[in-house]
Amino acid sequence: MKILLVGGGGREHAIIKKLKLNKSVEKIYALPGNGGMADDAQCVAIDAKDIDGIVSFAVENKIDYAVVAPDDPLVLGCVDALEAKGIPCFGPRANAAIIEGSKVFSKNLMKKYGIPTAKYETFNDMEKALEYLETAPVPTVIKADGLALGKGVIIAQTRDEAKEAVVSMMKDKKFGKSGENIVIEEFLEGPEVSVLSFTDGKTVVPMISSMDHKRAKDNDQGLNTGGMGTIAPNPYYTEEVAKECMEKIFLPTINAMNSDGRTFKGCLYFGLMITKDGPKVIEYNCRFGDPETQVVLPLLESDLLTVMQAVTNGTLSETEVKFSDKSACCVIMASDGYPVSYKKGYELSIPEEIKDKVYIAGAAIKDGKLVTDGGRVLGATCVAESLKEAINGAYKLVDKISFENAYYRHDIGQAALRAGGKN
Ligand code: AMP
Ligand code: GLY
């Protein structure tokens, strides 16, 4: 089989490495991929948002199956366009990807179907939003409606900060069109859990739970990033919480999307907060998480391509999706200065014997050498019997990798250990 994967980060590298294990896979093309995954896939310089370019490539190269990984192409209708040419795909169509593409949509969906989430108001008029903030409780959370590279959420501690956030989104257009509509919501407290799930629109199969570490610096200090490391499973996701999530969140969400004529097929990511009133949805993503995927897929024991095809074909209920009972830890190595500004172009050295545990997010080949080419450069993942061993193992991998200007957090997994992670 010839497979096309749209995307180019660490998540995509983890998907590719897993797909390659299926013997029927002859070739994987990554559009655009990155230089760091050239051993595992043929990278083709077509942007993930160039839907016409992707479709022409898929048709010309007689692609048998496509996996669309990032949010942008999904929201832009990449799956719809590929399916129109008869190419089976993993990923939701645009009318379902809106669950991530519009926060106003997802909040209204949750309200309509009674799915637990933070209380909220939506605004398309700045004056009305500012007036509302005069009496709104603080801290409060301001969210741009559309995609904003994970940066469209501002937690305001004071009313002044909240007003500033509204002005930056609605008047100064900090996130462009994404901030034309905004959500102002209740500030929730509690540990966060990421649950990625496979769903064919009828059955929903949660994957092993995970915990992201979004802040740039140790002890959750510094700016929000795309994610500086992950562990799985997440100790806060107990069997009891899992049961409650299935009953009150996962199944109701799948049913709600069906009732609205927006059947979701693909990976639906539930960003949850376990509050004192039970689990609530912080956000939905219409795709695999990054870097959650770099700990979740290494723990998947079933064949990924088989599961993905079952999602496409609507046969998920008949397909085994089995996860290992081990633990995993992924430490992200970034360029110092990320997420603001950073230098790139430094040579990367990764010993051959650990390459299967390293997912490359931002690298390029220059003059025959692999060099850094992004903020998040790579993730090193260790799978072990216990969380403690997985953490130690991931940091041992990091010690073997070198590039100038490397930066990483030293405390990935420590919060999970303190919370009683599997020892
Ligand atoms: P998002 O981009 O939606 O994942 O939000 C980024 C982060 O903001 C989340 O991971 C949470 O830590 C935080 N956040 C979002 N919404 C809320 C909320 N209502 N209350 C508290 N924290 C929130
Ligand atoms: N790690 C969070 C995300 O993928 O959105």
Image: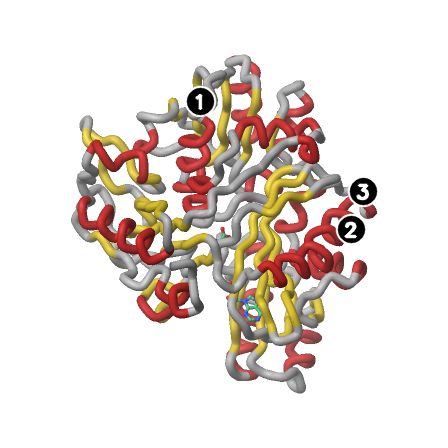
Q: Say which of 44 and 26 sits in front.
A: 26
Label 2: state its secondary structure: helix
In this image, 261 relative to 64: left or right? right
x, y percent for residue 171: 57, 67
Name which of mark 3 and mark 2 comes first in the sequence: 2
**Few, some or many C-alpha atoms within 10 Å of disc 1 (few <14, some 14-19, many ≥20)?**
many
x, y percent for residue 151: 48, 59
Label 3: state its secondary structure: loop
Residue 256's label in the rendered image is 2
Type of amino acid under label 3: Gly
Residue 28's label in the rendered image is 1
Label 1: state its secondary structure: strand
x, y percent for residue 130: 64, 78
Label 2 with label 1: CB-CB less than 8 Å: no
Name which of mark 2 and mark 1 comes first in the sequence: 1
How many numbered markers are drawn?
A: 3
Report which residue position mark 3 lands on: 261
Ligand 1 resides in the quarter of the picture at: bottom right
Label 3 with label 2: CB-CB less than 8 Å: no
Q: Say which of 42 and 17 sits in front.
A: 17
**Few, some or many C-alpha atoms within 10 Å of disc 3 (few <14, some 14-19, many ≥20)?**
few
Type of amino acid under label 1: Ile
- For image coordinates 31% across by 45% down, the residue present is 380
Name which of mark 1 and mark 3 comes first in the sequence: 1
- For image coordinates 56% across by 83% down, the residue present is 159
Which quadrant of the structure image shows residue 356?
Answer: top left
What's the distance in space between the residues labelled 2 and 1, CA to CA? Answer: 35 Å
